[in-house]
Image (spheres, helix red, strand yellow):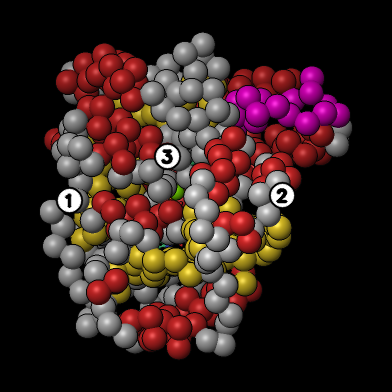
Amino acid sequence: MIVAKFGGTSVGDAASIDRLIGIVRDRTADRPLVVVSALARVTDALLGLGPLVHAGNGGALDAAVHALVERHSETARALPGADAALETIAADAAALRRELGAALGRMLRPDELDALAGRGELWSSRIVAAALGASGVDATWVDIRPIMVTDDRHGRATPQMTALAARARECLRPMIDAGRVPVTQGFIGATHDGISTTLGRGGSDFTAALLGAALDVKRVEIWTDVNGLMTADPRIVPSARTLRYASYEEAAELATFGAKVLHPATAQPLVRAGIPIVVLNSTRPDDPGTTIEPSAELERVGDSPIRSISWKRGITVVNVRAPRMLGSYGFLRAMFEVFERHEVVVDVLASGEVSVSMTVEDRSRLDAVVRDLGELGDVWVEDGRAIVAVVGIGIRSTSGLAHRLFRAVAPANVEVISQGASAINMTFVVREEDAPGVVRRLHQEFFGSC
Ligand code: ADP
Ligand code: ASP
Ligand code: MG
């Protein structure tokens, strides 16, 4: 048994879905479970309906929903047999239009946003299941929501592993054992009460891993639009090279610091069973991709001491300066309690004698965090920043690395530097506008090309 997950660009249009059919047909002997994302850019388009609802702009809302239905219709009509999915999609889009119409003039609640965002996966999976079925594969569309049980933290729900594993084994395994190919949705789930949730943006990879762990599959395949995990984002560094193997830890670090190719939590459910993740390019299905597994032999890329560079924009640095921190204990605990209370995640932290700098990505509760931190010391916030992370093996023990690194980063100004306890990464903060140049210069320095 394997899980084969196809991202947005791998189901973006009829030609991509046609390639998906070929890939799945080639794997029927492996007994695949197919997980799909929404068609490329559809989740963004769905979430873009929220502001139209808030503005009470019924006309624009009609047009936008119509355009989404058209996009799905066009895709399905170009695939033999897939138009069978269109009636369901059109009926659901009409239901969506009514739901949104009833909310005109107000902001959508988090649970409503989840019900909205999840439509993309529900619709794409209908098209893929119909197209696969018409190609002769015994495909069965499965609604993942009753299986993917989560808590009710809308927009970033946490899956409940024990419940979902039991349901996956109960519902999906018999189907697969009977030779059928379930086609289901990434990204979405539901609470115990059946209220729709989502696992956070890019969450379909996480779905694939959760189902892979639940079913104890042989491997989880992540089909995307690049050749695997690369030495840098190929959109920034066109000459980036593909890593043939990676470790779970390395993949998680890269993903946490911006390598969008994998959701940061993907490896997590697979660690205990040691199930490999293989990242593959759906436009070049014969390429080996990147295999992420515990026993991976991590080869050096050329003679470079590092393996990859990732970066993430939209970062805010929160600084706290408190002279009373000097020689006192309990300060950091008090500070982290503030972040915990407001459920704000800190990615990078650097601390001096009387000051601490932390990076956060989610600004939605920042005002409350800053207000509460103000009771501990002087607080100031800098936005428009980016994190750059250099990931490698034994980075901490490589002499002269920091010197090379900062020479390559110059003339950009480095603001927060942190070397994780993991010894495999070094992260720092620069201004957002400097980041692409910094990544390219680092790639030139460490991999000899940009
Ligand atoms: P999907 O829709 O298949 O989930 P994503 O857009 O989420 O695909 O992720 C794939 C993209 O990740 C690539 O197109 C690439 O631009 C980006 N990316 C960023 N960093 C890396 C990296 N280190 N290696 C590979 N791809 C990366
Ligand atoms: N469609 C969702 C998103 O765009 C989930 C995913 O693609 O993984 O975030
Ligand atoms: Mg993705």
Instruction: Please indicate, yes or no, whether residue 265 appears anywhere in the rendered image.
Output: yes
In the image, taking residue 159 as reference, residue 251 lies left or right, namely left
Task: Using the image as rendered, state which of residue 187 and residue 153 is in the foreground.
Answer: 153
- The answer to the question of whether label 1 and label 3 lie on touching residues, with beta carbons closer than 8 A, is no
State the SS at label 2: loop
Q: Which residue is mark 1?
A: 294
Label 2 vs 3, first from the N-terminus: 3
In the picture, the disc for residue 18 is none
Q: Residue furthest top?
A: 193
Which segment is the magenta one? 100-120
Label 1 vs 3, first from the N-terminus: 3
Measured from the top left, where is residue 349 in percent x and y? 50, 59
Q: CA distance from mark 1 to mark 3?
A: 22 Å
State the SS at label 1: loop
Measured from the top left, where is residue 28 in percent x and y? 19, 35
The quarter of the image holding the C terminus is bottom left
Q: Which residue is mark 3?
A: 204
Position of residue 132 relative to residue 305, above or below, is above
Whether the residue carrying mark 3 lies under 8 Å from ligand 2 is answered with: yes
Label 1 vs 2, first from the N-terminus: 1
Quarter-of-image position of residue 288:
bottom left
Residue depicted at x 74% and y 20%: 98
Q: Which residue is mark 2?
A: 374
Task: Using the image as rendered, state which of residue 335 and residue 407 is in the foreground.
Answer: 335
Residue depicted at x 58% and y 80%: 413
